[in-house]
Image (spheres, grey):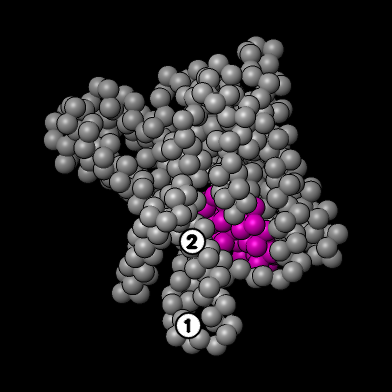
Amino acid sequence: MEAFNLFAVLTALAALFGWLNHKYIKLPTTIGLMVISMVFSIALLVLGRLGAGVVDPLVVLISSVELDEALLHGMLGALLFAGAQHVELNDLAEQKWIILLLATTGVLISATTVAAGTFYIFGSLGMQVPFVTCLLFGSLIAPTDPIAVGSILRKLRVPSSLLTKITGESLFNDGIGVVLFLAVLGVASGGHGVGVAEVAELLVVEVGGGILYGAGLGWVVFRMLKSIDNYQVEILLTLALVTAGYAFAAFIHVSGPLAMVVSGLMIGNQGRTFAMSDLTRERLDAFWELVDEFLNALLFVMIGVELLILTLEGSYILAGLLTIPLVLGARFISVAVPIVLRRPVREFSPHVIKILTWAGLRGGISVALALSLPAEQSRDLLLTVTYAVVSFSIIVQGLTVERLLRSLAGPELDPDAI
């Protein structure tokens, strides 16, 4: 009953905040929900400090939100599957090499650069944090969030080639980042140094297994969809793919996020083209669009109310503020290296590195991974720093990315300029 009460409160808050944003504030929906949720959380904290006991039950209920469990083991599969359906497979194939480099080499460069930088920042502030813990933070903050990226950029008039680069990278580097985080966490918890062989083995098993499993799952459901013409059953099949498929991926120890991305690409492309009637396509799109919007609303409200559980010490907040430019710098390097490597074989706009850097948003996945850390891995510090980076990314970068695009590519966002 407590879980239902929590779900009811979050749904009511999402509906209320969504109404307030749409009627009065008029920010992009996800950003507006997060901003209002943060203001709401701050108001609760202030009222609590003033001795208003009436708010205590609400604070306790909202503080019980387990974002890491809700997102990583509940919502993530559906959100990734829904997001992957928006990506054209042909467009993805044209950008495959740069996306592959950004999602692999880029994540590793960003994670190690952030780890080195935070090791210095924490040390200069008098916090003795082991390097392996800094590497944990680097791995959880390195991947761009497909949920934040997709929900914001799909509302903008972004050239399809650019949208494919950003969305494709975020869909795949999310899975890579989660696996890298779990690998480093396993080594850190074992009490010995980071072994490259151990990390590489887990990456191969989880990533390769997740891709193969997702392809097989997508093919089976595709064949089932093709054999019938009943949109109710077909929607139910895709829903089962996401829920049961994601749960089974965890059982066999392969990457559930990557499996949902691959199966979502298959159903969203081959499935839509060869296995569905016009009515089914229309109803399926409407269903998953509604699921995507609803889960996004809940997620960004949950991110906002997580402010209630942060340890708001001055040194932690300062560390978070200093880490924001570090993460942006690491993102710039992690984008620049793959682009430079690909320049001899294909042409890029001179602005593409700047755009990909600023449009690489961090979101709920980073917060959820930080929440999943054990206390001995400097959880309170890393959570506060992660929240600072994510808040800046979603609010500041999310609100200014279109302005940057227009300033670099012109008011019409000419695709050839990107």
Q: Amino acid at mark 2?
A: Ile
Residue at 37% from the left image edge and 33% from the top image edge: 85
Q: Which residues are magenta?
A: 363-389
Q: Amino acid at mark 1?
A: Asp
The residue where tag 2 is placed is 36
Q: Quadrant of the N terminus?
A: bottom left
Place residue 406 in its image quadrant.
top right
Is residue 117 in view from this perspective?
yes
- Residue at the far top in the pictured view: 345
Q: Is residue 114 above or below residue 228?
A: below
CA gap between label 1 and label 2 equals 19 Å
Q: Is residue 282 above or below residue 44?
A: above
The residue where tag 1 is placed is 56
Magenta includes 368?
yes
SS state under label 1: helix
Mark 1 surroundings within 10 Å by alpha-carbon count, few (fewer than 14), some (14 through 19), many (20 or more): some
Q: Is residue 72 above or below residue 84?
A: below
342 lies left or right of 259: right
* Nearer to the camera, 379 or 280: 280
Pointers 1 and 2 in contact (C-beta within 8 Å) = no
Mark 2 surroundings within 10 Å by alpha-carbon count, few (fewer than 14), some (14 through 19), many (20 or more): many
Residue 62, position as x, y percentages in the image: 45, 71
Magenta includes 149?
no
- Residue at the far front in the pictured view: 24
* Nearer to the camera, 352 or 18: 18
